[in-house]
Structures are given as C-alpha cells and as structure tokens.
Image (cartoon, grey):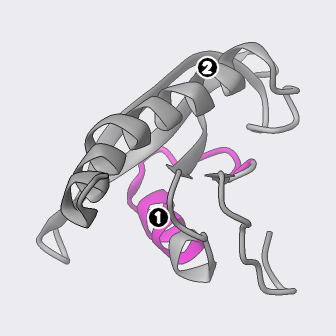
Amino acid sequence: MWMESSRARFLSAVVGPHFEQVCREWVAHFASPDTPGGMPIEVSYGTVADPEARTSHEIDVVVRGAVGQDSGVLLSLGEAKWDQVMGVGHLDRLRRVQSLCSPPVASTGSPYGSRATAARDSATT
C-alpha cells in the first residue's frame, strides 16, 4: 500500500509528464488542424517569462504550424493535467501567457487536456 506522499510524488514525477507527452503526441498525429488553429509542424513544451509578475510559466503543449503561407506560426498553447479538474483559472493563466507571447498566438485552439472533467463557464471554451 502506497503512502499518500509516495502517490503524489509518483503522479507528479511519472504520470503527469507522461500524460503531457501523450497530449503532445495526440496533437501532432491525430488532431484535426482546426483543433490547434492550423496544421501543426512542431508540438513541444516550453517556458514563458513573465517579467511583470517576476515569474515564468511552464506550458505543457506548445503548437507551431502553418496558417496559409505562413509557417512556424505559434498556433496554440495548452495545459495537460492528469489529476486536476481544469477550470477558468487554468484558462485565465493560458490567456496571460498568450498575452506575453510575441508575435501573438494565432489561436487558443483547444487549451485543455485533462483526464478529469474540464470545468467550464458558459462564456469561455
């Protein structure tokens, strides 16, 4: 029987990163181009600096791709959380990160990847 701290450590160190990779693979190989807002060329993860808040934001799914004749466009940013119900706070954080990106993100696409049920308000998706 696992102690709760061992379970939490396993979820954050093993299950979470694996689920993030599964989400990136899904976007790269199975998602419709409408999902990220264009044809994916590169799907990865990254960190965005937030100088105003004196912090940085880790982004689980970063999609660059082609829109029309433009390639390498930052199409979408996303979160992949195995053990959290995702809600408006997650979406607000992604919007903050989107505002920090230059050039701007072409689309927020589908920002969620969650094993848990995504909580959404009626005004945003």
- What element does badge 2 sit on? helix
Is the residue 91 above or below the residue 9 in the image?
Answer: below
Q: Are marks 1 and 2 in contact (CB under 8 Å)?
A: no
Residue at the (33%, 35%) spot, across then down: 14
Q: At which x and y percent is residue 90?
A: 52, 71
- Give how far across and how far down residue 1 sits, in percent: 31, 52
Q: Position of residue 99 (x, y in %)?
A: 47, 64
In the image, what residue occupies the spot 56% across and 48% down? 78
**Where are the magenta residues, as a range?**
91-109
User: What residue is at 50 percent from the left and 59 percent from the top?
Assistant: 83
Q: Is residue 67 left or right of residue 113?
A: right
Tell me the residue at 60%/70% (across/down): 86
Q: Is residue 66 left or right of residue 59?
A: right
Residue at numbered disc 1: 99
SS state under label 1: helix
Q: Is residue 49 above or below residue 118?
A: above
Residue 118: assigned label:
none
Give the farthest residue toward the left.
54
**Taking the image as drawn, is residue 21 in sight?**
yes
Q: Amino acid at mark 2?
A: Glu
- The residue where tag 2 is placed is 25
Distance in Å between CA atoms under marks 1 and 2: 25 Å
Relative to 91, residue 70 above or below: above
68 with respect to 72 (left or right): right
- What amino acid is found at the position of numbered circle 1 in the picture? Ser
Is residue 50 at least partly visible in the picture?
no
Name which of mark 1 and mark 2 comes first in the sequence: 2
